[in-house]
Image (spheres, grey):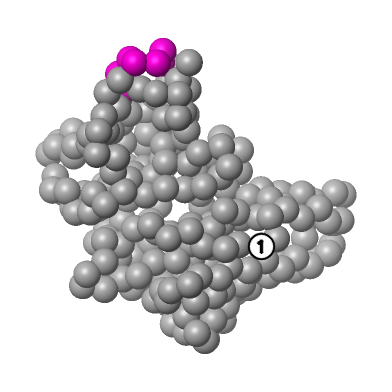
Amino acid sequence: GQQLNQSPQSMFIQEGEDVSMNCTSSSIFNTWLWYKQEPGEGPVLLIALYKAGELTSNGRLTAQFGITRKDSFLNISASIPSDVGIYFCAGQLVDSNSGYALNFGKGTSLLVTP
Amino acid sequence: GEEVAQTPKHLVRGEGQKAKLYCAPIKGHSYVFWYQQVLKNEFKFLISFQNENVFDETGMPKERFSAKCLPNSPCSLEIQATKLEDSAVYFCASTPSGGARRTDTQYFGPGTRLTVL
């Protein structure tokens, strides 16, 4: 599988601040996904993107599928303490030759202080 | 069930011992994926199944690792003769049709933490 480049590696912010993280790949995907993982648990899907240029929101979260199909970003607005966790991007190539496995970024660790 | 179930939660093995991990996918999901997450948070795809058939095993180590999904039984991932570097959290994910439908997403279980001493 391919390792995606995710940045920043970690963020330490105050409650109420906005957060932005992004993911790039050397090859194209036709699905981009953003997951959140909390300690001792599996990744939980936040947003799924299926079309280049697509901009999708889920509450305070907004994510976009890059036009080149090689990148995606996630924004979190007005952060709150429960946003703490590790955020992962994942790219998926869904076609007749692919195995459907997810290719993950290395994660962005988010800490939010009250 | 409505969630992917994985057992055990924790597993400790001495180097050279066998380890066996189990996964019950969400009811009605035909595809199961196994991933390995090592300490630096990196996820590595291991193997996937379509029902009881191996779908993609390109990430599976050639030696010591094997996996099965048998009818009416949880899927399993087995490591023969564990090594220190096998220490990781192993996640199972399931999806209705693998990704053939664009709106399919992979739902992850809570993971099994394997510690090899």
Mark 1 closeness class: few <14, some 14–19, many ≥20 residues within 10 Å: some
Q: Quadrant of residue B55?
A: bottom left
Chain under disc 1: A
Residue at figure coordinates x 31%, y 36% from the top left: B23
Q: Position of residue A13 (x, y in %)?
A: 83, 56
Q: Secondary structure at mark 1?
A: strand
Tally the marks.
1
Residue at figure coordinates x 30%, y 27% from the top left: B79
Q: Does A86 appear above or below A79?
A: above
Residue at figure coordinates x 76%, y 49% from the top left: A111
Amino acid carrying mark 1 in the image: Ser
Would you say the magenta stretch is mainly helix, strand or loop? loop
Q: Nearer the viewer, residue A49 or B62?
A: B62
Residue at figure coordinates x 48%, y 41% from the top left: B37
Q: Quadrant of residue A100?
A: bottom left
- Check if residue A68 falls in the magenta segment: no
Question: Which image quarter is the N terminus of chain A in?
Answer: bottom left
Residue B22 located left or right of residue A43:
left
Q: Nearer the viewer, residue B71 or B60?
A: B60
Q: Position of residue A90 (x, y in %)?
A: 48, 62
Q: Which region shows up in magenta?
A: B13-19
Q: Is residue B34 visible?
A: yes
Q: Is residue B29 visible?
A: no
Residue B72 located left or right of residue A89:
left
Q: On the image, numbered disc 1 is attached to which residue?
A: A7
Q: Position of residue B15 (x, y in %)?
A: 40, 16
- Check if residue B18 falls in the magenta segment: yes
Residue B16 located left or right of residue B111:
left
